[in-house]
Amino acid sequence: FVPQTAPTTLLLAQHAYKGQDSMLALQLLRGFDKRFPGNHLIPAAYALIVRVLVQGLHRPQQALAVYQGLQRLYPADPHTLEAGQILKDHAPAGQSPTAA
């Protein structure tokens, strides 16, 4: 099953994450930007990926790579700022991944 619209995909991924199914959330969001090119929800989807990777799967290095792409493509988007804050809040003492 693959949702056919960006809003449905994001909503299902959010529910999967809230239901503690991080892997399903990531699976739903995989390739979001390619399936829905130019969609205004891309930054929100990738901020959710950062959240899932950091808080759900404890993979901050992978999350940092996603965040850096998000920051490069959507530097002023509020979701980019949110993703940066998530990383900052979970960074080891003395490190700030958002400074990269």
Image (cartoon, rainbow, N blue to C red):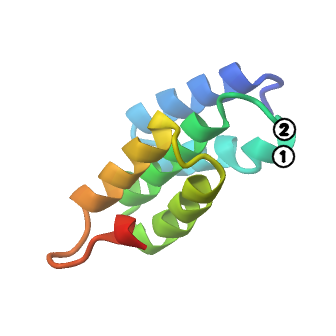
The location of residue 63, given as percent across then percent down, is 48, 63
Q: Residue at x 84, y 46 (%)?
A: 34
| Vertical arrangement, residue 71 with respect to residue 93, above or below | above
Mark number, residue 11: none
In the image, residue 22 above or below residue 58:
above
Q: Which residue is mark 1?
A: 34
Is residue 89 visible in the rendered image? The answer is yes
**Residue sticking out furthest to the bottom:** 94
Dot 2 and dot 1 residues touching (CB under 8 Å): yes
Residue 6: which quarter of the image? top right
For the C terminus, the image quarter is bottom left
Q: Which residue lies at the image location 66% right of the left edge and 37% below the top edge?
A: 42
Identify residue for label 2: 37
Relative side of 77 to 4, left or right: left
Residue 71 image offset from top left, x and y in percent: 55, 55
Q: Quadrant of the N terminus?
A: top right
Amino acid, disc 2: Pro
Q: Is 83 displayed left or right of 77 in the figure?
A: left
Is residue 30 rendered to the left or right of residue 52? right
Residue density around tag 1, few if under 14, some if 14–19, many if 20 or more, within 10 Å: few
What residue is at 59 percent from the left and 39 percent from the top? 43
Residue at the (59%, 49%) spot, across then down: 26
| Residue 1, visible in the rendered structure | no
User: 13 or 62, which is in the foreground?
Assistant: 62
Disc 2 versus disc 1: distance between alpha carbons?
A: 5 Å
Q: Position of residue 17 (x, y in %)?
A: 45, 38
**Kind of element beneath mark 1:** helix
Question: Residue 47: x, y in percent?
Answer: 50, 44
Q: How many marks?
A: 2
- Type of amino acid at the residue the image marks with label 1: Lys
